[in-house]
Image (cartoon, rainbow, N blue to C red):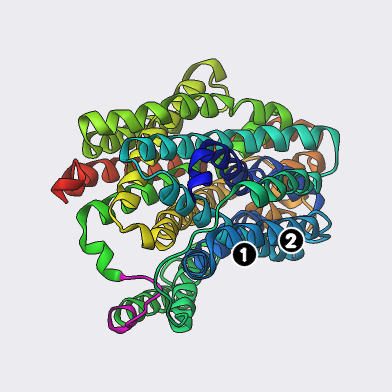
Amino acid sequence: MAKAYERRWWVMLVLSISLFMVVVDNLIVNVALPTLQRELSATTSGLQWIVDSYALVFSCLLLAGGGLGDRLGRKRALQVGLLLFVIFSTLAAFADSTTSLIVWRGAMGIGAALVFPATLAIITNLFIDPVERAKAIGLWSAVSGMAVAFGPVAGGFLLEHFWWGSIFLINLPIVAVALIAGHFLVPETRGSTHHRFDVVGLVMSIVAVGALVFTVIESPHWGWGSTRSNVGFVIAISALAFFIWFEQRRKDPLLEVGFFRNARFSAATGSIGIAFFSLFGFTFLVTQYFQFVRGYDPLESGLRTLPFAIGAGVTAPIAARAALRWGTKKVVALGLLNMAIGFFIVSQVDADSAYFGPVIISMLIMANGLALVTSPATEAVMGSLPREKAGVGSAVNDISREIGGTLGVAVTGSVFVSMYSPKILDLFNQIPGLVPALPEGVLEMAEESVGAAYQVAQQSPAEAQPLVLQAVSDAFMHGFGRACLVVAVTALVGSLAALKFLPARASNA
């Protein structure tokens, strides 16, 4: 371990590469959504599942991944996770249907659930000085923030020059570097206690998260308040309640629920979840806005997310030092407030709003806010736990990100569909003679898919085409604006909650 400490910043580089790949794959697919809608005939619900299947499996298995790392060794978990990740990435690249892509994207989450908590747990055990650990976690957060924007840029470049499967094959060389360098540089660490694995807790956590996300995504089609929707929410709440009850009574739980009695741990975890709820919900829609409404190609769309990488990359290291000086409470609350402001600004844009104006300003403010939240809040979570619990603590931190992001896509996608579908019908009905002239089933497809709605213009009478294009754009912006308002309000509530419940420093917890 002494040699590993001497080369700890080289170890940090390997961990950053591994982290970067996992986060990039969370978002690289977003820029390909319009392409996948065309190539695989995916509906809006199908697109939500293509995005969320990865994040859902990832979040469901993070506790298991963190626990296995603590028990069997974090380096081993990291390397096995990388290997699984690249195998399933290759299978996803050659998927030939929406369903098969959803399946293999979900399987990629198994590998990610082993990789992600291992990176942060190794950092916590290797960087033992609190100030240096804060810097390392700040760098970890900066890498994560830059990956948020690099994903769409890399995806856009690959889609510009290759077929859509290349966005998954790009993982192969990255994994090769991480595996070889990690074998020689990364030290093996594990927790000091070993217990039987909590299978019941794992199953209940999967049922709770899975039922919640599935119900939120499908409720716009079932009908909010319908029997199926209500049953889904009841299953999710019941499974969560049983999970908490069971974990409190088990001697060797998957998650020590008592951790959440520490206000610093629980409030910081909640802040991270809210930040990523807002971020993932926004990115799910903004790439479609750039391509469908603004007419940018995938690469142009990806490049227009670069301000996010710049804002997050510059702010993250500063955020860690700011939290040491002014306290976690003020920095995290300011970050969530900035995110709320950014989302409110973008909720007011229209189809013709200048990119070098409200759009880029909103993204810079959001990125600044995200970095102010993630670095200090992550340090608060990890600093609240003993080092032997680093794997589980890292998993909880990561779960808050992934469940927040998964629900962000599910909720904002559902809000969008709930606003977009009736609006597009209303606007189409206002165009004289359009609806009777459309082939059977086309109108229903336009309700389900923005891409299909644009294709309606090609099947419309020539004199109606400009009106159809304007109607689709207006309907999209109606749903987009309302969805962005939802995430703005969520971030604002999170900011107020951080001011109320998050202690400024560890000594106050």
Front in this rendered view, residue 312 or 491: 312
Percent of width and height locating residue 140: 48, 39
- Residue at 33% across, 39% down: 376
Residue under the point 53% across and 67% down: 61
Q: Earlier in the sequence, mark 2 or mark 1?
A: 2
Tell me if residue 171 can be seen: yes
User: Which residue in the protein does label 1 denote?
Assistant: 110
Q: Are marks 2 and 1 in contact (CB under 8 Å)?
A: yes
Could you give the CA–CA distance between mark 2 and mark 1, rounded to whole angstroms?
A: 9 Å
Amino acid type at circle 2 is: Phe
**Does 202 sit left or right of 132 as displayed?**
right
Residue bearing the label numbered 2? 88
Q: Which residues are magenta?
A: 246-256
Q: Position of residue 178 (x, y in %)?
A: 68, 46
- Quadrant assignment, res 439: bottom right
What x and y, as percent, mark residue 427? Answer: 58, 42
In the rendered view, tell whether residue 33 sits above or below residue 331. Answer: below
Tag 1 secondary structure: helix
Quarter assignment of residue 160: top right
The answer, for residue 474, to whether it is visible in the render is: no
